[in-house]
C-alpha cells in the first residue's frame, strides 16, 4: 500500500530524473554535415545580445574569443571565398538562421546574399552552445537559487562539460563529397583523438573554459603558448664534426599534439650564425596530398607519453657553422602564408614569435642515444 510519504517522493524523483535525462543530448554537433535544424533556437535567444544584459561577464569574455570570430576572422573570410562549401559554414556559423545569409548552389557551394549581418559576425555564439528552443542548458546542476532566480527556462546537460561536446566540431575528416556532404576516413582535425591518446585527465573545458571563462585561451591569446611551453636548447658536435641543435619542447599542460587543429598551422625553427646569417630553417608541420587526402609528412610534436605531458626532442643538423641564434615562429596558415602576404594581411594575423634569442653552450654528447625527429 502506498503511504503518504512515497507520494511526495514521486514528483521529486520525476523532477530529478527529467533534469538528469540527457541522452541523446540536444547539444550534439555533427562535424558540419548539417547546420542546426530550422528553429532549433527560439528567435528571442538567437543573438548574443539577448544574454548580454544579464550575463555580461560571459558576454565580454566571449566577445574577444576566436569562437566569436569563427566567421568574421579575415583568414576565414579569405578561405571561404576560395573554398566556398556549405560544409564550412555549417561548422563556422552553425545556426540555421546564419546559413540563410547564403544561397546554396547545386554543387554544394555557397554564395553570400547579404551586405552586413550581425548574426553571422557573432560566429559561434551563446545560443549555438547553450540554447535549444526556449530552453537554456547549463553544465552544472542548477542550485535552487539559480532555478528560482533565472528568468528563463533552465535545464541541466552534463554533455556541455564533456570533451565529446567539443569533438562535434573539433574532430572531423576530409569530405568525400560535398553534396550531400559525406565524410571520408582521412582525419582533417583530430584534437579529440589526440586528447584520448594523451592520457590527460583534464578535459578540454578544464584548460580552455577554466572556471567558466569564455575568452577561450589558445594560440590567438597573447603569451598563452609561451607561458605553457618550456624550451631547452643544446648544441652538439656530430661524428662528422659538424654541428647539430637539439631542442627539447615540453608542455605540462597540453591535452593534445603541438600543434593540433587546423592542418595549415606550422612552426618554423630558424637558425642563424653569430652574424645573423641564416643557416637552416626546419618546419614542424603536416603536409597533405589533397587528391588522395592522405598526410604525406608530419613533423608536429606528438603527445604520446600517456601522462598528459608532452616532451619531445627535435634534432636538427646544421653544418659547419656554429649555430648561435634562434627564432621560432608560429604560423597560423604556414602553407599559404606567402599568398596571404600578397593579399596584404597584417603580419600579426599571420604569425608570431615564440622564441627569439641566443642559445646555450656547446655540449659533447657523442654516443648518447637520443629520440630524434630527423
Ligand atoms: C533577464 C536576465 C537574463 C537573460 C536575458 C538571460 N539570463 Fe541566463 N540567467 C539569469 C539569471 C538571473 C540566472 C540565475 C543565476 C544564478 O542565480 O546563478 C541565469 C542562469 C543562467 C545559466 C545557468 C547558470 C548557473 O549558474 O547554473 C545559464 C547557462 C544561462 N543563464 C545562460 C543564458 C544565455 C545563454 C542567455 C541568452 C540566450 C541568457 N542566459 C539570458 C538571467 C538572464
Ligand atoms: C563553444 C561553446 C560555448 C559558447 C559559444 C558559449 N558558452 Fe557558455 N559555457 C560553455 C561551457 C562548455 C561551459 C561550462 C564550462 C565549465 O565550467 O566547464 C559554459 C558555462 C557558462 C555559464 C555558467 C553556467 C554553466 O553552464 O556552467 C554561463 C552563465 C554561460 N556559459 C553563458 C554563456 C553566454 C552568455 C555566452 C555568450 C556570450 C556563452 N556562454 C557562450 C560553452 C559555451
Ligand atoms: C591540459 C590542458 C589542455 C587540454 C586538456 C586541452 N587543451 Fe587545447 N590547448 C592547450 C594548450 C597549452 C594549447 C596551445 C598550444 C597549441 O596551440 O597547440 C592548446 C591549443 C588548442 C587549440 C588551438 C590549436 C592551434 O594551434 O591552432 C585547439 C583548437 C584546442 N586546443 C582544442 C582543444 C580541445 C577540443 C580539447 C579537448 C579534446 C583540448 N584542446 C584539450 C591546452 C589544453
Ligand atoms: C559549433 C562548433 C564548435 C564547438 C561546439 C566548439 N568549437 Fe572551438 N572552435 C570552432 C571553430 C570553427 C574554431 C576556429 C575559429 C577561428 O580560428 O576562426 C574554434 C576554435 C577553438 C580554439 C582555438 C582558439 C585560438 O586561440 O585559436 C579552441 C582552444 C577551441 N575552439 C576550444 C573549444 C572547446 C574546448 C570546445 C568545447 C567546450 C569547443 N571549442 C567547442 C568550432 C567549435
Ligand atoms: C566540423 C567543423 C569544421 C568544418 C566543417 C570546417 N572547419 Fe574550419 N576550423 C574548424 C576548427 C575547429 C578550427 C580551429 C582549429 C584550430 O584552432 O587549430 C578551424 C579553423 C579554420 C581556419 C583557420 C582560422 C584561423 O583563425 O587561423 C580556416 C581558414 C578554416 N577553418 C577554414 C575552413 C574552410 C574553408 C572550411 C571548408 C572547406 C572549413 N574550415 C570547414 C572547424 C571546421
Image (spheres, helix red, strand yellow):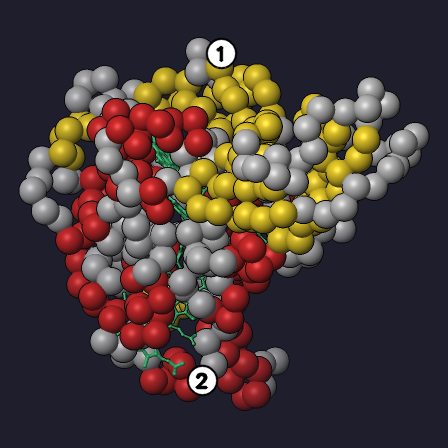
> Compared to 7, does 224 lie above or below?
above
* Residue 159 as seen in the image, left or right of residue 321: left
Residue 275 screen position, x and y as percent: 57, 37
Q: Which residue shows up at 20% across the image and 66% down it?
A: 49
Hey, which residue is sitting farthest top in the picture?
A: 291
According to the image, label 2 marks what residue?
A: 144
Q: Secondary structure at mark 1?
A: loop
Q: Which residue shows up at 59% across the image and 27% down it?
A: 280
Q: Which residue shows up at 49% across the image and 41% down it?
A: 330
Question: Would you say residue 95 is visible in this rendering?
Answer: no
For discs 2 and 1, the disc positioned in front in the rendered view: 1
Hey, which residue is sitting farthest right in the picture?
A: 367
According to the image, label 1 marks what residue?
A: 292
Residue 218 screen position, x and y as percent: 48, 53
Q: CA distance from mark 2 to mark 1?
A: 55 Å
Dividing the picture into quarters, in which one does residue 244 lie? top right
Pick whichever, 364 or 218, lies toward us: 364
* Residue 4 as seen in the image, left or right of residue 240: left
* Residue 205 as seen in the image, left or right of residue 339: right
Do tag 2 and tag 1 residues touch (Cβ < 8 Å)? no
Residue 299 screen position, x and y as percent: 62, 29
Pick whichever, 355 or 57, lies toward us: 355
Amino acid at each position: 500500500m502506498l503511504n503518504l510519504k512515497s507520494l511526495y517522493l514521486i514528483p521529486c524523483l520525476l523532477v530529478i530524473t527529467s533534469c538528469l535525462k540527457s541522452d541523446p543530448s540536444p547539444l550534439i554537433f555533427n562535424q558540419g554535415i548539417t547546420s542546426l535544424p530550422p528553429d532549433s533556437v527560439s528567435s528571442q535567444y538567437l543573438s548574443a545580445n539577448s544574454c548580454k544584459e544579464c550575463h555580461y561577464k560571459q558576454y565580454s569574455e566571449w566577445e574577444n574569443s576566436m569562437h566569436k570570430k569563427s566567421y568574421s576572422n579575415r583568414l576565414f573570410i579569405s578561405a571561404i571565398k576560395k573554398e566556398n562549401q556549405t560544409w564550412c559554414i555549417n561548422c563556422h556559423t552553425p545556426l540555421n538562421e546564419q546559413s540563410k545569409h547564403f544561397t546554396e548552389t547545386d554543387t554544394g557551394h555557397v554564395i553570400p546574399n547579404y551586405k552586413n549581418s550581425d548574426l553571422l559576425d557573432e560566429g559561434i555564439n551563446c545560443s549555438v552552445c547553450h540554447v535549444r528552443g526556449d530552453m537554456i542548458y547549463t553544465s552544472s546542476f542548477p542550485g535552487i537559487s539559480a532555478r528560482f532566480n533565472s528568468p528563463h527556462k533552465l535545464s541541466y546537460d552534463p554533455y556541455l562539460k564533456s570533451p565529446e561536446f567539443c569533438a562535434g566540431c573539433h574532430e572531423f575528416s576530409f569530405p568525400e563529397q560535398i553534396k550531400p556532404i559525406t565524410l571520408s576516413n582521412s582525419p582533417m582535425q583530430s584534437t579529440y583523438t589526440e586528447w584520448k591518446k594523451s592520457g590527460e585527465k583534464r578535459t578540454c573545458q578544464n584548460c580552455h573554459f577554466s572556471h567558466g571563462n569564455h575568452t577561450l585561451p589558445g594560440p590567438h591569446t597573447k603569451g598563452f603558448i609561451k607561458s605553457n611551453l618550456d624550451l631547452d636548447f643544446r648544441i652538439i658536435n656530430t661524428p662528422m664534426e659538424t654541428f647539430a641543435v637539439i631542442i627539447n619542447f615540453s608542455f605540462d599542460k597540453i591535452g593534445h599534439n603541438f600543434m593540433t587543429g587546423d592542418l595549415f598551422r606550422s612552426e618554423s625553427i630558424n637558425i642563424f650564425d653569430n652574424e645573423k646569417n641564416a643557416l637552416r630553417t626546419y618546419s614542424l608541420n603536416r603536409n597533405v596530398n589533397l587528391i588522395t587526402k592522405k598526410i604525406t609528412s608530419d613533423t608536429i610534436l606528438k603527445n604520446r607519453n600517456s601522462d598528459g605531458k608532452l616532451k619531445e626532442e627535435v634534432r636538427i643538423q646544421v653544418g659547419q657553422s656554429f649555430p648561435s641564434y634562434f627564432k621560432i615562429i608560429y604560423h597560423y596558415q604556414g602553407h599559404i602564408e606567402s599568398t596571404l602576404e600578397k593579399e596584404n594581411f597584417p603580419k600579426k594575423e599571420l604569425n608570431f614569435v615564440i622564441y627569439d634569442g641566443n642559445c646555450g653552450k656547446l655540449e659533447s654528447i657523442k654516443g648518447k642515444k637520443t629520440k630524434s625527429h630527423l
